[in-house]
Image: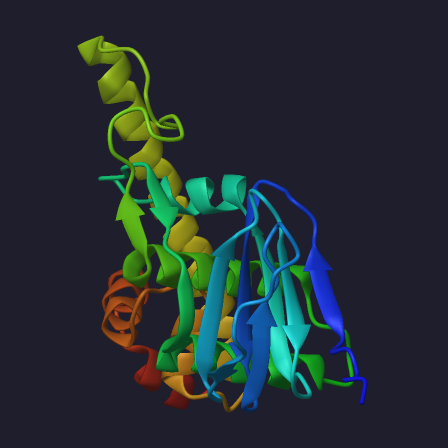
């Protein structure tokens, strides 16, 4: 009796990370470079798979696959990391079958956007991408040591140049926060999404961070701003 071959999914090598968020339980096996297959592994609903695509990646499906998939260029990861005033070069770590409630919430919010009758604004999708990258950097990354992979933030040791870089980073961070608050205002008025979902959609690392920044920019909390009558 001949065993039916499982469907295969192959991703080409590129300077990016691949993130998959499982919306339903799934099973698949890795296909190694020599064609050998690892034992099939079960990935529970709400878990993630995060791999580096530097050498590509291939899997053989052993079940239906209902998931959200993201290809995240390493340049984008570096740009999001650089928004922090204390930015250090980081790389994302491999994750297989690890539960992540925050990415699950982000995925559900993204699905809700896809279901909108009108087209989703490009700017909003960009905020989602930044929110995903920021979360991965905060929870699933490690600092690059020494010359590993190069340091995209290295530069001159001149104190003046260093000060200028810090000021430029600080100004860019402040501008980014203002843009996120402006996007949050639109979502607060136009949707009934929970505050936590809005925080992550707009790129804030947590609800408390969102509340602090929003309060600093507007003088009121997101909930109070949403409840206030329009003027």
Is 211 above or below relative to 1? Answer: above
Is 150 above or below relative to 143? Answer: above
Image point (22%, 11%), residue name = 157
Q: Name which quarter of the figure residue 81 lies in.
A: top left
Image point (29%, 75%), residue name = 207
Place of residue 220 in the rendered image (x, y in percent of width and height, measured from the top left): 27, 74
Is 42 above or below relative to 94? Answer: below
Horizontal placement of 122 versus 134: left or right?
right
Q: Nearer the viewer, residue 133 or 216?
A: 133
Q: Is residue 225 visible?
A: no
Q: Name which quarter of the figure residue 83 lies in.
A: top left
Q: Name which quarter of the figure residue 219 lies in.
A: bottom left
Horizontal placement of 22 versus 84: left or right?
right
Place of residue 109 in the rendered image (x, y in percent of width and height, measured from the top left): 54, 82
Determine the residue located farthest toward the front in the rendered image: 1
Quadrant in which the N terminus appears: bottom right
Place of residue 147 in the rendered image (x, y in percent of width and height, measured from the top left): 31, 24
């Amino acid at each position: 009796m001949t065993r039916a071959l499982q469907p295969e999914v192959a991703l080409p090598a590129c300077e990016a990370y691949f993130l998959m968020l499982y919306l339903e339980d799934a099973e698949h096996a890795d296909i190694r470079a020599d064609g050998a297959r690892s034992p099939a592994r079960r990935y529970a609903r709400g878990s993630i798979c995060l791999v580096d695509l530097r050498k590509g990646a291939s899997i053989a499906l052993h079940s239906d696959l209902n998931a959200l998939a993201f290809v995240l260029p390493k340049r984008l990861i570096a740009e999001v990391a650089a928004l922090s005033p204390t930015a250090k070069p980081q790389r994302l770590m491999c994750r297989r079958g690890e539960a992540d409630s925050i990415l699950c919430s982000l995925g559900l919010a993204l699905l809700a956007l896809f279901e909108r009758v009108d087209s989703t604004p490009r700017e909003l999708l960009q905020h989602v991408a930044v929110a995903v990258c920021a979360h991965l950097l905060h929870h699933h990354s490690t600092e690059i040591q020494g010359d590993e992979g190069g340091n995209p933030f290295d530069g001159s040791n001149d104190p003046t140049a260093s000060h200028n870089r810090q000021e430029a980073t600080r100004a860019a961070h402040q501008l980014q926060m203002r843009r996120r608050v402006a996007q949050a205002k639109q979502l607060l008025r136009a949707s009934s999404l929970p505050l936590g979902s809005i925080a992550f959609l707009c790129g804030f690392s947590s609800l408390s961070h969102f509340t602090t920044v929003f309060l600093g920019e507007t003088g009121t909390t997101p909930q109070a701003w949403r409840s206030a009558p329009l003027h």
